[in-house]
Image (spheres, rainbow, N blue to C red):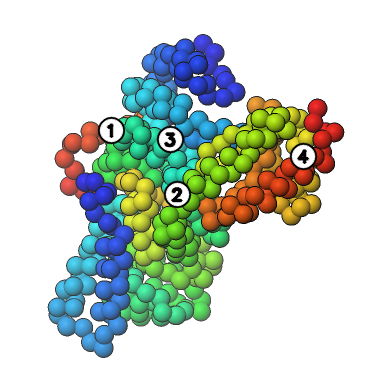
Amino acid sequence: MNLRLKLLPNPAENPKWYKKLNSHIKKHGSDIAGIIAEPVMFSSGVYDIIEPLRIVVEIARENDILVFFDEVVTAYAKTGRMFAYQHLTEKFGEKYRPDLVTIAKNITRGAESLSAVMLNAKVAKGVRKFDEYFYGFTMGGARRACQWALDELILMEESNAPRLALELGDYLLQQLKPLEREGAVRQVRGRGLLVGIQFHSPEQTRAVSTELQKSGWAPYTDNDPNTGCDYINPLFMFNDTRERVDRFISSLREALQKSAGKRE
Amino acid sequence: MKKSDISYFSANLSRVNRAKEILGKAGNSRRDQAELDAIDGELADFAAKHLLRQFGSKLAYTVVYDVPDFGKVLTRHGAVEDLGAFHLGAVSWRGDVRAKGNLFHIPYELMDYHVTQIDNVMHTEAILFASKLLDVSGMDMVGFGLSGSSAVDLAMKIALQYHTGRIPRLHLHEPPSGKT
């Protein structure tokens, strides 16, 4: 059974694929320790797969397989919630809370080396019972890193970072969507502040990126060989302003004009 | 237990601050000592229950409350250098202290010298950060690494051990084992 896909399909458009996945897991479940997913696939082109993951979580629960969300990119308000899985738990309930969640990098805003793996009650209960559990990293959880992380978390909470990220992200998408309608870019997509602008060709992506850099922006530009997708992420933070978004849109329009010849 | 019912973070922060206050007094009464004992127990209980990193029911934790400045690491038993935990200057970590599996709060500056010998260290800041993170996320346990890849590595090991049954699959309504 071929389950290989470039992207997780929309369950409404391709329900058969999820049925295949369920059958496959039922058949080979004894060989499957867990399902790992990044709720918004960032380096693969900024694809929001949170809603499709709901079906994957249901299949995993049905087959007693652990679900593991890698939230290194999506955590800490990037998607408009402190953690991306909260979109699922708020809407559909606790059943959709992943069993394991990893976070890193932005937990100290890159100032110190620190990462964490969080366990839900089900797995934690087993780990507590397993009292010989001994695993860790030398210097993991070091004092200064944890102090940074604590300060960052308090700052984000006091600033109401998820709400700010959601509002600014919505505004950013609202300002970018006309470019898609005008055909200036191929597609604009994302959730919260994880926004991807896909262009018509790799040449256009590179040209726009270069022009944006000349205007003082440092967008994240990447190409994913699996999807063949060239895209730019403007890298806004929750505490950025609408004025800065407006300046970016203005620079982007200018960059698109200057690189018009690179579109095809 | 619902995370919304209890704020580990504020409770633990106030415990640490209260301990610092008691330790800062010129002399401690029996009542102070009893309060410190209780705080030690509560924080160690939290660490044992909720911090995955190198805990175990066999460990007896000692919480170190403060590092006012380099060389004066304050614990409820006195300064760390007086306990023989460090030879300051030579910066060594003695095996006898490590063997007790104590929870120590070590100045970060010391770590660079003896990276391989701090495996049983648990920091007050780690407890406080873990408390806050569990409050905000609604998750139940946390372990620390140094990078995204080390966290993923740890998560995959846990998933594998859960899959193979080394970490037992328990129903949430099962009573606790009595061990932490």
Q: CA distance from mark 3 to mark 2?
A: 25 Å
Q: Nearer the viewer, mark 4 or mark 1?
A: 4
Q: Residue B18 or B118: which is nearer the viewer?
A: B18
Residue furthest to the left in view is: B31
Of callouts 2 and 4, which one flags the residue occurring earlier in the amino acid sequence?
Answer: 2
Name the quadrant containing residue B174. top left
Chain letter of the residue beneath label 3 in the structure image = A
**Residue A161 coordinates in the image, percent (x, y):** 46, 53
- Residue visible at 45% across and 77% down in the picture: B87
A93 or B2, nearer to the observer: A93
- Report the amino acid beneath label 4: Leu
- Residue at the spot x=41%, y=79% of the render? B68
**Residue closest to the far right:** A261
Bin the neighbour count of mark 1 within 10 Å (Cα to Cα): few under 14, some 14-19, many 20 and up.
Answer: some
- Are discs 3 and 2 located on one and the same chain? yes
Q: Position of residue B67 (x, y in %)?
A: 40, 76
* Mark 4 Cα-neighbour bin, 10 Å: few <14, some 14–19, many ≥20: many
The mark found on residue B169 in the picture is 1
**Residue designated by label 3:** A68
Q: Is residue B180 left or right of residue A153?
A: left
* A152 horizontally vs B135: left or right: right
Q: Position of residue A2 (x, y in %)?
A: 54, 13
Q: Where is B29 relative to A245, above or below?
A: below
Give the residue displayed 34% in from the left and 31% down from the top. A92
Label 2 sits on what residue type? Arg
| Label 1, label 3: how far apart the Cα atoms are | 16 Å
Along the viewing direction, whichever of A239 and B134 lies nearer the viewer = A239
Residue B17, disc: none
The CA span between labels 4 and 1 is 55 Å
Marks 2 and 4, Cα distance to the nearest angstrom? 31 Å
In the rendered image, residues at marks 2 and 4 fall on the same chain = yes
